[in-house]
């Protein structure tokens, strides 16, 4: 009996082990609810309606007021409401042939002056109302309106508006307003025509082969580019209005008979939940509708290229275009998409495949190379070839820092260089790159701060990270690289493996609009792999990716 | 029992089920199997033992899956009560859960020992084990689907690196080390079956996985693929290790496969030694074994006690750690692993057969068509 007890006691772990077990439980118990809470509070702050407007918005004085038809009164009300806006112009005229006065309202810089001059002012002032019509005007107010719209004004966009508030809003958004004496409705003519730039090659996604077309800041141009891509009856463009204070148009694009209706529904419901004063750029939309706020990986793909959007739509994805930005959003996104470029498809399949394999390798290098350097130098010099280990140790002889500090110095300085390169004026950017990269690198080695081998590692890493075709994905890898370096510094090669497992665990848990982030890597499916690391010949890729559950899975349709 | 325990019903594909079995099986065995077999067989015929026990395991897996297929959409913890009644089922489920927990614990301990020996000398065990278990927890909380997806990512890496490393060892491979075939008759081969069977534990995950399969009818195919791949890999490993180091050389080493990797150098390649490669994939394999056993044990608790799954994932973590710390040294850790291994032969070889017969006689469960 005593023997039994003593064996049991012998095997009962020490109290330190119990403390460690407690720690093992405590830390995730604290961390996971914390992350959950952060995520919840982040999500709720934008998905709920603002409970009070602060400061309370002043009610428009025009609220609920309709046109009376009494010219002077109406114009006075409008002048009172918007008279202090510097850029609103009032042009009073007399319609020829009648004694009716009229006023044209427009915003300087937003309105097409040519349109006003030749299609509104000219017919009203020169042509006017014919003799025989004149009398009937006094009988009915509608006849005047009909005559003006049907026979006089040669414009395509024309809309009567009885509500003064809406009329004023439209004028302020750049449409031309016309008020005619005796009419109980004002006319809204034309569309806003602000300045826009011409269509250019997209800067952030330049290709050697492929259309040299990028989106612009105007939504109309962008949807036009999608339509222009080719005759296509199934392309649907649904319009939403987002923004509570500053209202912006947002277009949800998808292929009617390809996209999964559930996906479209989910995306539109998330768009409708957006509560924000002004969605400045599509990045706002992206951040307000994504699944996981805390993930370093982007869950929405952004692009400037119409061909990329169309390709996404044809795979069964949906796209979001926002007024005022050349960046369209494609969703859902998967990890493989971030390493693919439209060029892979435009080129023949062998070059496409080769470059893709190269990119996957480069991504691995960009993620792990400095971490592996640190772990091998600091922990396992025995695992690298003896000669190499010797030469590295020799060059590191003068370096006074441990390898993590050494690598951090280099990595941080190259990140700073890269960031500076974006801000620098174009002509001196490359020059500064050379100065920073070559000269500082060389000087750092000569000064004995870093070892030349590390300079090679850092340079290879930096160049590798440039091969990633999606800029924002490159940033993700850059952030993760630092995490990898720290885990290597703490636990060596084991730390690197753990880091890799953590990233993979996160990736397999991540979903973008219901689609697992790691598809098509898993589940194993040969037909999906034709467009993953390799890019099979086009003739072999007959199916659309099944992860999106498209309505029509045959790519030949 | 309500299915709300496991959250929304998740599906895994047939290939995912097979991959789960493969990843579960390929665990600590890669490093130690050549020694355990060589010790028992003492002739170069160890590889025949592995094939034979592989075939036995295939049969056991087939029986186990046939049992599971009769109860579609239900895990072991849910269908056993239908066959045996509540109390025996409770006992059986506890045994299975305990088995999963001890397997997880022993894998953790062996991981800590190997890492401490080869990669991080002087690092305390807890520093190695704690982050490892936290990442495992993070993955397991994602559910069986996430687990399966992760396994599908690490399996190709494992296979490529392992085959590459073993092929490179052909430099010191000597076919004479494998001769004579059956020189001492069939008896040594039979002696080797018992220890090798231990390395093939892993098909029992089908007790849980079958319930989640999208096409449960294909479970047999999944388990057969899942067992065949490790059989081929283990046979290949043992052939290469014994061929490279001879049967006498293998017996004396604790980690013969790692020693094989250390005993040759390939000039001109980026790496001259490949134990780091082998260790990397081995850590990943231990991770997969740990997470799947953690998942199975937590699911078991949550289903027999009808409580939330997440609670048990958290609660089992420190328990597994304490179990892992009980053995005083690596030999005892091996002993622990072996003991539960033998239990597995009984638990997953004999009991499913009995249950299958009972369910056939008592006409419980649906007939798989």
Image: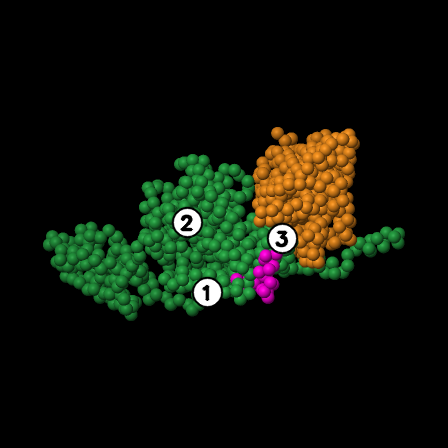
Chain colours: A green, B orange
Residue A166 percent coordinates (x, y): 31, 59
Instruction: Name which quarter of the figure residue A369 lies in.
Output: bottom right
Judging from the image, mark 1 belongs to the subunit labelled A
In three-dimensional space, the C-alpha distance between marks 2 and 3, rounded to whole angstroms, equals: 54 Å
Q: Which of the numbered marks, if any, corresponds to residue A319?
A: 2
B298 on left or right of A528: right
Q: Position of residue A192 (x, y in %)?
A: 29, 57
Answer left or right for A306 relative to A3: left
Q: Residues within 10 Å of mark 3 (few under 14, many from 20)?
A: some
Residue name at image x 52 percent, y 61 percent:
A411
Q: Relative to residue A89, is residue B176 depicted above or below?
A: above
Residue named by callout 3: A386
Image x and y of residue A346, in percent: 39, 43
Is circle 1 on the same chain as circle 2? yes
Disc 1 from disc 2: Cα separation: 32 Å
Instruction: Say if labels 2 and 3 share a chain.
Output: yes
Using the image, name the chain to which the residue with label 2 belongs: A
Closer mark to the observer between disc 2 and disc 3: 3
- Among all residues in the image, which is located at the extreme bottom? A84
Query: Measuring 68% from the left and 58% from the top, which residue is drawn there?
Result: B127
Q: Earlier in the sequence, mark 2 or mark 3?
A: 2
Which range of residues does the magenta coloring cover?
Answer: A390-410
Residue B75 place in picture, x, y as percent:
66, 41
- Decide which of B117, A510 is in the foreground and name it: B117
Residue in view at x 48 percent, y 59 percent: A46
Q: Nearer the viewer, mark 1 or mark 2?
A: 2
Residue A440 makes an appearance in the image: yes
Q: Nearer the viewer, mark 3 or mark 1?
A: 3
Q: Is residue A403 magenta?
A: yes
Is residue B238 visible in the rendered image? The answer is: no
């Amino acid at each position: 009996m005593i023997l039994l007890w003593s064996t049991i006691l012998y095997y009962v772990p020490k109290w330190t082990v119990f403390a460690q077990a407690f720690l093992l439980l405590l830390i995730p118990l604290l961390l996971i609810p914390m992350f959950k809470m952060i995520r919840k509070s982040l999500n709720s702050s934008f998905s709920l309606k603002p409970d009070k407007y602060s400061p309370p918005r002043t009610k428009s004085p025009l609220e609920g007021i309709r046109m009376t038809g009494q010219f002077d009164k109406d114009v006075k009300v409008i002048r009172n409401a918007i008279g202090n806006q510097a850029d609103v112009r009032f042009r009073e005229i007399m319609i020829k042939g009648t004694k009716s006065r009229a006023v044209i309202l427009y915003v300087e810089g937003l309105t097409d002056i040519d349109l006003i001059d030749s299609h509104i002012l000219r017919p009203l002032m020169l042509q006017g109302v014919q003799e025989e019509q004149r009398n009937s005007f006094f009988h009915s107010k509608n006849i005047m309106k009909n005559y003006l719209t049907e026979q006089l004004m040669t414009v395509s966009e024309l809309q009567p508006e009885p509500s003064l508030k809406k009329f004023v809003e439209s004028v302020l958004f750049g449409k031309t307003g016309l008020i005619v004496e005796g009419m109980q409705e004002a006319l809204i003519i034309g569309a806003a025509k602000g300045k826009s730039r011409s269509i250019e090659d997209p800067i952030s996604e330049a290709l050697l082969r492929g259309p040299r077309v990028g989106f612009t800041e105007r939504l109309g141009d962008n949807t036009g580019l999608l339509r222009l891509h080719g005759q296509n009856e199934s392309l649907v463009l649904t319009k939403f209005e987002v923004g509570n204070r500053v209202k912006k148009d947002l277009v949800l694009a998808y292929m009617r008979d390809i996209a999964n209706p559930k996906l479209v529904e989910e995306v539109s419901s998330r768009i409708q939940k957006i509560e924000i004063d002004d969605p400045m750029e599509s990045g706002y939309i992206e951040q307000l509708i994504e699944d996981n706020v805390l993930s370093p990986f982007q869950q929405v793909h952004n692009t400037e290229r119409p061909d990329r959007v169309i390709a996404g739509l044809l795979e069964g994805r949906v796209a979001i275009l926002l007024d005022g930005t050349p960046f369209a959003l494609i969703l859902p996104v998967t990890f493989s998409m971030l390493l693919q470029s439209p060029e892979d498809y435009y080129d023949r399949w062998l070059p496409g495949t080769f470059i893709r394999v190269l990119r996957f390798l480069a991504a691995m290098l960009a993620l792990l190379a400095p971490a592996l350097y640190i772990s091998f130098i600091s922990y396992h010099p025995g695992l690298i070839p003896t000669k190499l280990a010797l030469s590295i140790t020799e060059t590191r002889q003068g370096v006074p820092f441990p390898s993590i500090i050494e690598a951090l110095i280099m990595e941080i300085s190259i990140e700073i260089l890269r960031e500076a390169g974006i801000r620098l004026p174009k002509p001196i950017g490359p020059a500064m790159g050379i100065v920073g990269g070559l000269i500082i690198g060389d000087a750092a080695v000569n000064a004995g701060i870093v070892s030349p081998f590390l300079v090679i590692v850092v340079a290879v890493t930096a160049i590798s990270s440039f091969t990633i075709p999606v800029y924002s994905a490159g940033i993700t890898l850059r952030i993760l690289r630092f995490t990898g370096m720290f885990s290597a510094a703490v636990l060596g090669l084991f730390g690197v493996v753990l880091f890799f497992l953590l990233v993979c665990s996160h990736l397999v848990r991540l979903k973008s609009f219901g689609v697992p982030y790691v598809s098509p890597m898993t589940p194993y499916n040969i037909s999906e792999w034709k467009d993953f690391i390799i890019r099979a010949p086009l003739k072999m890729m007959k199916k659309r990716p099944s992860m999106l559950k498209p309505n029509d899975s045959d790519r030949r349709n | 029992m309500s299915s709300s325990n496991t959250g929304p019903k998740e599906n895994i594909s047939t290939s995912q089920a097979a991959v789960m079995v493969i990843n579960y099986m390929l665990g600590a065995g890669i490093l130690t199997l050549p020694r355990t077999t060589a010790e028992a067989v003492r002739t170069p015929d160890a590889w025949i033992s592995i094939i034979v026990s592989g075939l036995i395991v295939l049969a056991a897996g087939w029986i186990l899956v046939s049992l599971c297929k009769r109860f579609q959409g239900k895990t072991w913890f849910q269908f056993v009560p239908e066959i045996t009644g509540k109390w025996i089922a409770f006992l059986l489920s506890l045994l299975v859960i305990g088995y999963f927990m001890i397997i997880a614990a022993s894998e953790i301990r062996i991981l800590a020992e190997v890492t401490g020996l080869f990669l991080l000398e002087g690092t305390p065990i807890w520093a190695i084990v704690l982050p490892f278990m936290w990442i495992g927890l993070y993955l397991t909380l994602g559910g069986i689907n996430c687990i399966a997806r992760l396994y599908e990512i690490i399996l190709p890496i494992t296979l490529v690196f392992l085959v590459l490393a073993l092929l490179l060892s052909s430099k010191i491979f000597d076919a004479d080390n494998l001769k004579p075939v059956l020189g001492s008759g069939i008896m040594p081969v039979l002696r080797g079956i018992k220890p090798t069977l231990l390395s093939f534990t892993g098909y029992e995950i089908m007790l849980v996985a079958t319930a989640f399969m999208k096409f449960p009818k294909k479970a047999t195919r999944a388990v057969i693929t899942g067992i065949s791949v490790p059989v081929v890999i283990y046979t290949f490993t043992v052939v290469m290790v014994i061929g490279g180091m001879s049967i006498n050389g293998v017996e004396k080493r604790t980690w013969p496969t790692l020693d094989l990797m250390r005993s040759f150098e390939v000039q001109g390649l980026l790496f001259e030694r490949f134990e780091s490669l082998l260790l990397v994939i081995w850590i990943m394999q231990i991770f997969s074994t740990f997470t799947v056993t953690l998942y199975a044990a937590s699911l078991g608790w949550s289903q027999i006690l009808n409580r939330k799954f997440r609670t048990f994932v958290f609660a089992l973590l420190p328990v597994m750690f304490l179990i892992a710390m009980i053995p005083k040294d690596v030999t005892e850790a091996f002993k622990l692993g072996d003991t539960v291994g033998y239990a597995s032969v009984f638990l997953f070889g004999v009991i499913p057969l009995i249950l299958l017969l009972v369910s056939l006689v008592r006409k419980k469960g649906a007939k798989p068509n």
